[in-house]
Image (tube, rainbow, N blue to C red):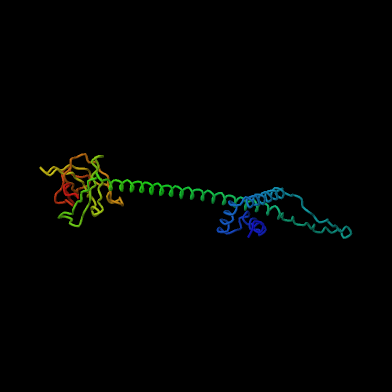
Amino acid sequence: MNIKEYIASGILELYVAGSLSEKENEEVHVAIQENSDLLTEVLSIEKAIVKLTAATSKKDASYLFTSIKKEIEDKETKIISMSKPKNNWLQYTGWAASILIGSALIWSISQNNQLKEQVATEKQQLEEQIDKASNNLAEAEKLITVFRDKDIISVPLAGQKVSPNSYAKVYWDKKTNSIYLDAKGLPDPPKGKVYQVWSLKLSPLTPTSLGTIETFTADTNKIFTIENANESEAFGITLEPAGGSESPTLDQLYTLGAVTAAP
């Protein structure tokens, strides 16, 4: 259906009068927003109805009376017949049209505001998703560069008695005094517990805490960047109470690996 046929169908008049279903109102509203000719036609219809309302809203207080007939000869006073004032249906029609127009305009404005809010929300969500994807991509590219660096020391951490199936891997970048811990092989810690990472000197055995992994469960890729300025000879991961411990709980040692054992 082209624009002329659409206008000739009378649907715009029904739209202005608020006589369409909610679905039809939405369809016409979208069509008006997309086509300036339709918007012009709607404004023209509304203008015409407003003029009609103004022309028919004046009160008409005149009444038509029938002639009073007297029968002088019989000297009998007859009932004066008086015509009832006709209802000014045009006035009522005008007011009804005004109400319908007002309702339609209010509904249209409300729908437009809701659509704007929905579009703004969806736009914000999309921007957040794009930012997150961009950050993830940048982080992934950084990790690939680190893992391929020939100066990076790779240290596999094997599962211990308390959790023999656990495993992890440390990528130690001495130039930046940091390690990249791949902890994908660790199970989620129980409630109230947290993993703590340790740098170890072996002779004598001297542990130094590198901190706890507070975001382990929430992190999806399980790769964590941790500062390490120590001359580490080994790395270990223990399960500790929330907040961590000053020294490792050895019977909760999940993984352990020596730097000298790295390939």
As drawn, the residue found furthest toward the front would be: 150
Tell me: residue 242, above or below residue 13. Answer: above
One can see residue 194 in this view: no
Residue toward you, 3 or 104: 3
Q: Quadrant of the N terminus?
A: bottom right
> Residue at 16% across / 54% down in the picture?
160
One can see residue 155 in this view: yes
Residue toward you, 221 or 105: 221
Residue 162 position, x and y percent, is 16, 55
* Relative to 263, 71 lies left or right: right
As drawn, the residue found furthest toward the left would be: 204
Residue 236 position, x and y percent, is 18, 48
> Residue at 32% across / 45% down in the picture?
142
Residue toward you, 82 or 197: 197
> Residue at 14% across / 51% down in the picture?
251
Residue 121 position, x and y percent, is 46, 49
- The image quarter containing residue 83 is bottom right
Residue 48 position, x and y percent, is 69, 50
> Residue at 24% across / 45% down in the picture?
152
The mark tally for this picture is 0
* Relative to 222, 248 lies left or right: left
As drawn, the residue found furthest toward the right would be: 73
